[in-house]
Image: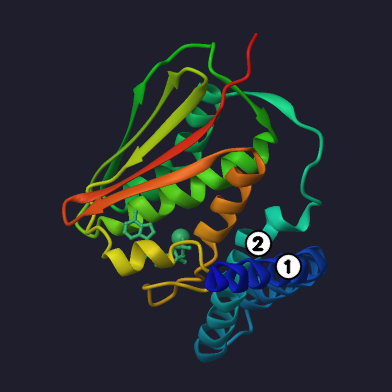
Amino acid sequence: VLERLIKADKLQVVSHLAASISHEVRNPLTVCKGFLQLSSGAQEVSPKTKEYLETAIKELDRATEIINDYLTFAKPISEKKNKINICEEIQNVVNILNPLAHMNNVQILISGEKTDSLFTLGEKKQLEQSLINIMKNGIESMSKGGVLQIGAFYENPNILIHICDQGKGMTREQINRLGEPYFSTKENGTGLGMMVSFSIIRNMGGIINVESDENGTCFTIEMPASRG
Ligand code: ADP
Ligand code: MG
């Protein structure tokens, strides 16, 4: 119990910090990148300098990615809740992630109910962020490519969203650490994606379950359905 408490404390500190820096930091990063791109495109630039500028741009991109993972935290939590059409959102995030999937030899398949009658309450952008973070991990777990499945189902009174990959899976210890700030097994990981996902779904009154073995990982998001 004590360990849980400490974990929750840490999470609060992290999200406060994120809220205060996220917006302030994004703008200067964008401006810097713009000027570096301009400089790198100039005719009088030597190949060596161009290489330095490209490296600087890459590092800026990485910083922006970290900010992106935080961004949903920057909004005050428990804003107004709208009705979200789940199948529409799934289609949206699949469209967003398809290019990344292609680059990794991953095919994204939509299964489950393709109806216009699955709704939940919350903020569209936040649900999208949460799904994207989980799906990105799925794509990244399949180093040799494979299939990523996502599907939504109604199970009275809840909506279940399954996200299953054919990746390398996680050990028990890794599963236990999921959602812990900065926990990452990746060379360039931020260890923030799952923390953000868990926090968003919890804020929507839902929970996330994980099943994983050496053949892949299945995340199941369970959240209250909203009626008509
Ligand atoms: P990051 O992706 O930056 O490492 P995340 O918070 O998104 O941070 O994920 C934390 C860790 O959880 C990952 O580094 C990875 O070890 C593990 N993980 C999450 N999802 C999966 C998955 N689908 N398959 C295998 N490992 C996963
Ligand atoms: Mg991730």
Residue ID for mark 1: 18
Residue 70, numbered circle: 2
- Tag 2 secondary structure: helix
Q: Is residue 48 visible?
A: yes
Q: Percent x, y for residue 11?
A: 64, 67
Q: Percent x, y for residue 206?
A: 56, 38
Q: Give the quadrant of the N terminus.
A: bottom right
What residue is drawn where x is 77% and y is 49%?
77
Extreme-left residue of the structure: 215
Q: Is residue 206 above or below residue 226?
A: below
Observer-nearest residue: 28 or 182?
182
* Label 2 residue near ligand 1, CB within 8 Å: no
Left or right: 160, with 210 as reference point: right
Q: Is residue 223 above or below residue 98?
A: above
Q: Percent x, y for residue 195?
A: 55, 60
Q: Earlier in the sequence, mark 2 or mark 1?
A: 1
**Amino acid type assigned to the residue bearing label 1 in the image:** Ala
Tell whether label 1 touches label 2 (CB within 8 Å): yes
Separation of marks 2 and 1 at Cα, in angstroms? 6 Å
What residue is drawn where x is 60% and y is 46%?
202
> Quick one: label 1, few (<14), some, or many (20+) residues within 10 Å?
some
